[in-house]
Amino acid sequence: MSVVPDGQPAVAPIDRRFCCALLAAAFAVHLWFSLQGLANRPVDGHEFRQTQTAFAIREMAAHGLELDARLPVLGNPQALPFEFPLYQWATAAISRATSLPPEPLARLVSIAFFYLSIPFLRRSAAFAGLTPTQVTLGTAALLCCPIYLFYSRGILIESTALCCSAAFLSAACWNMRRSSPARMAAGAACAALAAAVKVTTFAVFLVPATLILLRQFRSADSRQSRRRLLTAAALQSGAGIAAGLAWSRHADWVRSQNPLARFLRDSELVRWVFGDPAMRLDPGYWTSIGGTITGCIAASFWLVVLLVPGLGVKRDRTMIVSLLGCFLAGPLVFANVYRIHDYYFYAVAVFLIGALGIGLAHLVEASRLPRAARWAFVAGFLGTGVLMYARTYHRLIPFNELRVPEPARQLRDLTHPGETIVILGQEWNPVYPYLAGRHALMFPEATETNAALRKAAVDRLDEPVGAVAVFAPNPGRMRIARQMAARLSLRREPMEIGDGSFAFPRRDQLNAGTRYGGEAPVLIPGGRHAIPSLSDAQTHNFSMMDPLPVEVASEFGAEAALVGRELWFSAHPVTELVFAVSGEHRLHAQFAIIPQAYADPAKSTDGVEFEAVLAREGQPDRTLVRRLLCPAREPGDRGVQTWDVSLPPDCRGSLVFRTLPGPAGNKSYDWAYWRSISIR
Amino acid sequence: MTPVLSQLTTPAAPRTIFPAASTRQIRLVWLAAFACALLFAWHTRHAWEDYYITYRSSRNLATGNGLVYTQGERLHTFTSPLGVLLPALASLMTFNSSDAAALWLFRIMGAASFGGAAALIFALCIRHRFHTAAAILVVAWLCTDSKSLDFSINGMETGFMLLFLSYTAWALFSPGVARRALHVGCAWAGLMWTRPDSFILIGLVSAGAWLFNDDRTTGLPRPMLVRLFLKAGLICTLMYLPWFAWAWIYYGSPVPHTVIAKSSISGAKSLAGLLDTLLQAPWNTATGHSTAGDAFLPAYSVAGGWPGWLLATARVAGIAAGFVWLNPRLDTMTRASSVAFLGFQIYLSYFPYFPFPWYLPPAALLAYLAFGGALTHVIESDGTRPRRSLWIQGFAWSGAVLGLGIQLWIVGNEARRMRLMQELIDEGNRLRIGRWLSGNAAPGDSVFLEPLGYIGFTSGLKMLDWPGLASTEVVNARATVGPAWSAIIRYLKPDWLVLRPREVEQINKEDQNLLKVQYTAARDFDVSDRVDPLDVRGLPLLQMDEKFSVFRRSPTVPVVIDSGVLETRYPGTQVAKVTIGGVRMVLVHAPGTLTIEVPAGKTHLRVSFGFSPDAYAAPPITDGATFQVEWHAGDRTEVLHTRTLNPATTPGDRGAFAVDLDLPDPGGKPATIVLRTMPGITDNKDWTCWSAAEFR
């Protein structure tokens, strides 16, 4: 390696070309992955936050742009602003202008903001002293990072916040180099916007801005230059902080107008955002943060392999340490939200990736490895980023329709547009009302027992109530729901709407609902049980079988569950159902692995073996029919499968229907079901 | 002096280029390591459970019954060819008269190999210009590595693994070695004879040597290195082929059944999964989800009982050893050892279903070499850079000495723990169980259990062990009925069960009737009163095996009664009389039989059967049973009638059922009628009854 006199390594032209080619390839990869699942419903990860943002966009697209975004889940007033709605405005405005559906548009706008942030980040990195190779490789790493591949396409404000904060940093660097009133004003505007859109992102970007300022301050050659630097910094940061505070006060006041939203006041959220001070000293906290970093940003192997040698080079050490400091500022300050939501790392992962870019450049420029090996390493790093994405986040994209929870579908079917759904047991989670396409009046747990508050909230509604829905039902909550249903002239008896939840719809929905509408079946604990020894409620679990089995054995407990509108018998391996047979018989059975078991390939079944075995005392067991279903791999194994088999003549003994884990013995996500069994 | 020893001590090239240890130093190191190992053996008398799995085959070989675990079953129930052949040789050396003497002979072989490993490593370090103190430290780390010491003398093959791995490193990395390909080939063959999965280690060390090859020190450019590997590979193949071919012919497969049994419960493996393990290796090590830290910890530290600081230190050491190769200034051997350590840990973390402690000493050896090289790099100037500051040197020395101190602390505690384990668990429990079974079980009885070693060896019975190391039946059963022990026991119907309390609990949870109905508690072996009060590090390992319960399959006892000979598993209910539908009957609890001689000249039989009404009156209730009338004469058997009744679910099956049957012509031979009842899935309240037979 040759080194030029100022300490900067010389980069061979071929390496520059490789850099550019890699960047182009990384951009193509990012674009290709970003456009997948563009029309997805916002149920592909962090559904709460995505539907919250999508709700505001949908309301703006319907009613026009508003400063105070509506989130119609806590009744009236509906305005529940948190962040300055730049992203929501941009999406709703385009949607209104083009009549394009808001959801795909929201994803495109998010992607656009991400791409827009890249020039700002590159400019800031170059100003901070990174070499062109480091900047280029860092950009390629950014494009191949799982967290930027996934959340850039989410219906989230993260990319808008990143773009605004990157613009602020870039403007700050610009003003440090040469300032003018117009540039100062532009910088202050960027800072104000960044702080209003997402103050937690802006606050983190103040750290690199401060570090660059300190460096410039130290190297400034005159008092006048220093004064100019301080003035520019104060003006821009001040504008940001002032705008952030002003917007926060305003949003807080608007939220306080809804009596049910008191728990969303800023004063109530401080602990939620910052967490307990002691949290930062808890090894468990850092284990959780480390898990997110190594799972969502860069594999720990690369963190060690790229950062450790870089730290050994004096030229790069300060920069890497500074970038790591910027990166850690987020989880150190906003500890709780970084622990709970991995998408918060969207704001700070750029700094870690900058440090990795330096490591990559070091590998390219200074390694003694042959050129092919060096570039293989770089390609390996970028490739493993994409591979990590493909094995984690990307698996949330397919089968999107299956991720729409059943209660949301049922609530949509049970109510009419223009009706409000009263929901208990879901706090203020907008997923169900958003996906049902209805406004909601949700009672957070702390408020649901307050009868006066409930009555006032219902009275404030300007839409009729279409149904009362109860999630996580318990006797107290069901009693409240019955009272509300009676008062609102809804059906008195609840109907199951899936996932263990119930609804009290309008009386004209009497014929709707599921095949099973009676007493909920009761779980049969794990182990082997003779059916006659079970209670009636436990025997309900076998209502899809004729005749009843004589015995059931299961490892995790046996019960029937609602699949669609039918009651199916859950047969998580290993489960056995034993039927007594004697004489001529024909067996008819339907079975399946439900789609949720293979919708997310990262968390999917590796197959379940279904078999029917004839067991006779004194004779070897005889397998009558056997089928291994691997729906994740074999499309033909999806959906309901049927056996229709004649049993051997004079068949006496026991017929055992058994589910077994796949060949690997792995029982994870083996959500197998018997839809029906009949032996005649 | 042997040629190898001569090369260890006398450089092939001028001494000024390649320094070498003296013969005296080499012998001293060997003696010291050998003495350490024997001292550990003498103090602990430890014989590892798995030694006796292998030794049962060794003993069969030595006594002329073939290299098999169970006579007549050609099953490859061991992994290490040397680990089974040398104990057989040791047994022969005692004229098959003393298993204890054979074990001591094998211990001496293991200890000698351990000493050989230490001597080779010392010679290699000196030849590699390690600082003398660093070379001594590497040997000291090895000699105080508790797992290396223990598993070199407790009957496992670890001493030989260390010897041949050291030989590989010496042959590959020592500058100026003559006939290098032959040495490397022999070392590799030794590794393969010791453990057939050694090709992983061979590949990793070779890959490291190739990747970080510096021909200025090795004298071999990369293409020549590849040629060397090819030659060595050929020699290794020729030397290992006889065993491979013999095992294939003798057992029908060259793959040990132990590998098949273990791999069948370790889940599916994929390239992507392996890549994940590599990519997250540092994080997994830091959080204790990798074996890298375990290389420096006592055996089964995962069971608990060791201080948190020790686990944290071991994890730091694991990460350091795995990434020393990142420093480009280090020599080839140091970097290759480090990358081989990393690769081996990834293999151990991903492939085996549990990283057993005797897999880890080779990894520790590689780590010690990497640490020794790094230490030398820090404390000595190589001429291309200034010497490190005294602070850094001091830090490095402190770390090295502290590491040795921790190893000494561990080995002290381990010596005590393993001695107690031998005394209380291995001899106090397992050996006693085996002897008790030997005295109480019938030849040919089968035993289902997990701790196969001592019990299998001393009882000599047919073992149905989990996960099936010595039993194809268990492996097949798992594939047929799933991994639940209750299902496997129900399927295989072993005569005896040897279970720990938590295993009993789990089986009862899975199948509440199995142990109560089909088995009888025969005896408990419990040393918890001696184990629990102990103040010893790593106590949970001992507590895991402090109590065993032995269950016996409930026998059927023949009893002569008025109406015939009654056999049932429930002696308490034997001659109970019941009236069903006005017919007086005798209770023949299913499974059971009532055998009656057919009077001469009788050609018709009338008999009634049915369930006692109490069987389905209140929970728990019967799930039905099958009634069968069999006719036997000489070697002729005919089933005359079969009927399954389930009175709990079918009201029509309640009451008494009479059958009139024509009897076949016995041809002058005495004939018998067997009235048999067979349970449904369970024999809960299978109160099945037969009336007295009426012959016409």
Image (cartoon, coloured by chain):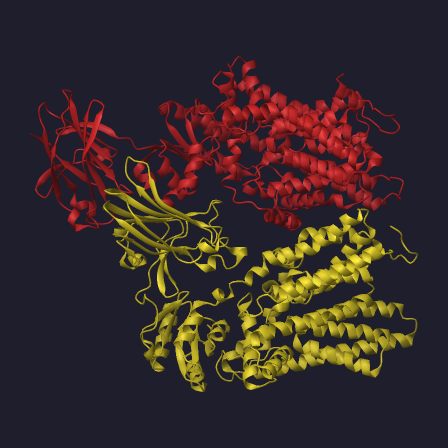
* Above or below, comparing residue B163 to residue A276 in the picture: above
In the rendered image, is residue A295 in sight? Answer: no
Nearer to the camera, B345 or B418: B345
Residue that sits furthest to the left in the current view: B696
Nearer to the camera, B515 or B695: B695
Quadrant for residue A181, please give it.
Answer: bottom right
Judging from the image, what is the letter of the chain drawn in yellow?
A
Q: Describe residue B392's horizontal placement relative to residue B108 as left or right.
A: right
Residue at horizontal 80%, vertical 60%?
A: A133
Nearer to the camera, B551 or A373: A373
Residue at horizontal 20%, vertical 22%?
A: B634
* Above or below, comparing residue A179 to residue B214 in the picture: below
Quadrant for residue B328, please give it.
Answer: top right
Q: Chain B is shown in which shade? A: red
**Residue A122 picture location, percent across and down:** 77, 67
Quadrant for residue B655, please give it.
Answer: top left
**Residue A339 picture location, percent across and down:** 61, 63
Q: Describe residue A132's horizontal placement relative to residue A486 as left or right.
A: right
**Residue A239 picture location, percent across and down:** 74, 80
Q: Describe residue B595's horizontal placement relative to residue A23 as left or right.
A: left
Residue at horizontal 77%, vertical 32%?
A: B173
In the rendered image, is residue A625 in sight? Answer: yes
Residue that sits furthest to the top in the current view: B95
Nearer to the camera, B317 or B579: B579
Q: In this figure, what is the number of numbered marks?
A: 0
**Residue A448 picture location, percent across and down:** 43, 75
